[in-house]
Image: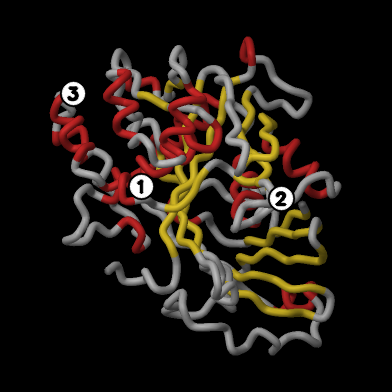
């Protein structure tokens, strides 16, 4: 049993960006779009929310069959270990225990790849000719809907698809991006989610899974953020934060270069600690004055209502170190961070100021 198993489920999510046709810039100056989808009302977690593809860790993500496939394809131990040489902070989700068959840096990537295929029919494979490009590849030319249904419903294992196609899952083109833990007050359903980033040189065909996916869309980070603030769609908080980070990088090649350089620097887990204010509420993140020291990610915030007679602005002005998201309504958030980005990451404000309203 893993340390936090009784408190939350492990999951993985994949941020997929694809170059615009002919590398053209859109009206906001981006030469890429990000793949997201709206969950249906039938889903048990975040119904009707806009999310990146992703879902719960499954036993098949840690199956020995992957190691046999790697051996058959002559994937060297050095190539696998290149994914594990992380020097920075490590959230517990990445800890490999005695009961794990695969290193968690590998199995979590396999989880993200599987969920992306199950939900949207996008299968990412390694570029065997040139892994140095930093870009992943989407595989087509097979009966995607049948395999998608078979893997989703458990009739086939995900590893069987790669074996059938004689392809390698693109573990190296999935860059470690961030880790988010559901806040403690969501007691009934919590997750620790490892987010990865992958880039494609062109947008592949998408095959939405009918039970989980209401609609999918390819949009620039700024388009998605604007539509959220206008009330046209609702972004889950981690998705909104990560899109805010992405919004400051307009060029997909620069984004890949950054991701390759940063991927082994680790990730500090983000578990928002929520406080109420007189005109809304705010979630503090690591580095904020109000973020608990030695937070165990389990204990409820007994001071949630300590500041409920002060406004969000008053609380902001009285703090020295700020890293928080202020909520004034479902579609109105202000991102506040006056310190350096953690783990060598993109700054949520693009280093342009102390706060930014979404």
Mark 3–mark 1 CB contact (< 8 Å): no
Residue at 54% x, 65% y is 182
The disc placed on residue 48 is 2
Q: Measured from the top left, where is residue 304 in percent x and y?
A: 65, 84
Element at badge 1? helix
> Is 258 on the left or on the right of 219, as rendered?
left
Mark 2–mark 1 CB contact (< 8 Å): no
Label 1, on which residue?
Answer: 108
- The residues bearing labels 2 and 3 have C-alpha atoms spaced at a distance of 41 Å
Residue at 61% x, 42% y is 211
Q: Nearer the viewer, residue 72 or 14?
A: 72
Which of the 4 image quarters holds residue 70? top left
Q: Residues within 10 Å of mark 1 (few under 14, many from 20)?
A: many
The disc placed on residue 12 is none
Residue at 62% x, 49% y is 239
Which of the 4 image quarters holds residue 312? bottom right
> Is 203 on the left or on the right of 171, as rendered?
right
- The residues bearing labels 2 and 1 have C-alpha atoms spaced at a distance of 25 Å
Label 3, on which residue?
Answer: 73
Q: Residue furthest front?
A: 155
Residue 62 higher or lower than 182, as above or below: above
Element at badge 2? loop
Residue 140 higher or lower than 222, as above or below: above
Q: Measured from the top left, where is residue 183 in percent x and y?
A: 56, 70
How many numbered markers are drawn? 3
Q: Nearer the viewer, residue 236 or 259?
A: 236
């Amino acid at each position: 049993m893993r340390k936090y198993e009784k408190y939350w489920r492990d999951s993985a999510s994949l941020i997929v960006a694809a170059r615009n046709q002919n590398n053209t810039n859109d009206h906001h100056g981006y030469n890429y779009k990000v793949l997201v989808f709206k969950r249906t009302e039938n889903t048990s977690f975040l119904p009707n929310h806009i999310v990146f593809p992703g879902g719960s860790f499954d036993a098949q993500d840690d199956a020995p069959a992957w190691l046999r496939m790697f051996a058959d394809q002559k994937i060297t131990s050095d190539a696998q270990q290149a994914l594990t040489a992380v020097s920075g902070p490590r959230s517990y989700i990445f800890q490999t225990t005695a009961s794990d068959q695969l290193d968690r840096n590998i199995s979590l990537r396999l989880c993200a790849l599987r969920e992306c295929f199950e939900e949207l029919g996008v299968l990412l494979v390694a570029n065997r000719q040139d892994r140095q490009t930093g870009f992943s590849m989407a595989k087509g030319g097979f009966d995607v809907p049948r395999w998608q249904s078979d893997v989703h419903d458990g009739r086939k294992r995900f590893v069987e698809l790669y074996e059938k196609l004689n392809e390698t899952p693109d573990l190296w083109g999935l860059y470690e991006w961030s880790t988010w833990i559901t806040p403690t007050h969501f007691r009934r359903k919590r997750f620790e989610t490892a987010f990865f980033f992958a880039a494609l040189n062109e947008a592949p065909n998408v095959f939405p899974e009918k039970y989980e996916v209401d609609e999918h869309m390819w949009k620039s980070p700024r388009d998605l953020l604007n539509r959220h603030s206008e009330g046209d769609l609702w972004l889950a908080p981690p998705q909104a934060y990560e899109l805010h980070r992405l919004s400051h990088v307009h060029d997909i090649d620069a984004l890949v270069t950054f991701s390759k350089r940063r991927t082994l620097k680790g990730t500090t887990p983000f578990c928002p600690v929520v406080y109420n204010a007189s005109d809304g509420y705010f979630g503090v993140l690591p580095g904020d004055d109000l973020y608990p020291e030695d937070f165990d990610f389990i204990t409820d915030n007994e001071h949630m209502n300590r500041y409920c007679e002060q406004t969000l602005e008053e609380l902001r002005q009285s703090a020295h170190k700020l890293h928080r998201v202020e909520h004034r309504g479902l579609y109105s958030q202000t991102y506040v961070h006056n310190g350096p980005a953690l783990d060598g990451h993109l700054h949520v404000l693009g280093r342009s100021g102390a706060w930014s309203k979404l």
